[in-house]
Image (tube, helix red, strand yellow):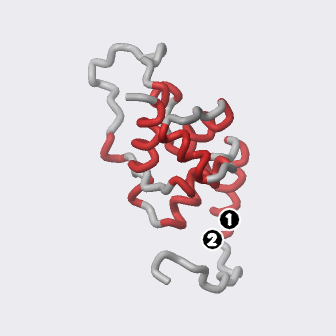
Amino acid sequence: MTLNQRLKKFRTASGLTQQQVADVLSLDRSTYAYYESGKTTPDIRSVSKLIKIFNISYYDLIDEPDPTTTVNDGANEEDEGEKMHIYELSKMEKQLVINFRMLSPAQQEDLLFSLSSSAFDKKKKPRKSVETDEN
């Protein structure tokens, strides 16, 4: 499978549109479409962002064996049932996950702390309803 085919596979499996991915990459949709058609190849900065967006490893994207992979006897297999896939989320939740993945680890921790604090602050009044998928 080629890089462009893997890009399309990971994007569609994530339930994202080309426009959503292009927006995160700060590209025109047509530029991202060229990546998926094989007309052009993403630069290293875009590859780094794509890995975060799709929550995959570099080796998943380039389809080369991971040199750190060792033989697994099955005793330490990760429970796939516990993973939540991005395509199971609403449009707003997907955007939140994408934006979260683009943050540094320190920024992620700060955001989580801030969200936890505000979620339990009973004095804070909720904002007026924002547009959701149901509206």
Which residue is at the front of the view, 93 or 123?
93
Secondary element at tag 1: helix
Residue at screen point 52% across, 53% down: 18
Disc sitting over residue 33 in the figure: none
- Tell me: residue 101, above or below residue 119: above
Q: Where is residue 96 in the image (x, y as percent from the top left)?
A: 58, 59
Toward the left, the furthest residue is: 74
In which image quadrant can residue 120 be found? Answer: bottom right
Q: Where is residue 115 in the image (x, y as percent from the top left)?
A: 65, 63
* Quadrant of image for the N terminus: top left
Secondary element at tag 2: loop
Amino acid found under the numbered disc labelled 1: Ser
Whether pointer 1 and pointer 2 mark residues with C-beta atoms closer than 8 Å, the reply is: yes
- Tell me: residue 59, above or below residue 119: above
How many residues crowd around disc 2 within 10 Å: few (fewer than 14), some, or many (20 or more)? few
Q: Position of residue 131 (x, y in %)?
A: 57, 79
Whole-number angstrom distance, CA of label 1 to CA of label 2: 6 Å
Q: Residue beneath label 2, please?
A: 120
Amino acid found under the numbered disc labelled 2: Phe
- Tell me: residue 135, above or below residue 38: below
Toward the front, the furthest residue is: 39
Q: Residue beneath label 1, please?
A: 117
Q: Position of residue 89 (x, y in %)?
A: 44, 61
Query: Could you tell whether 45 is left or right of 80 in the image?
Result: right
Residue at screen point 58% across, 32% down: 41
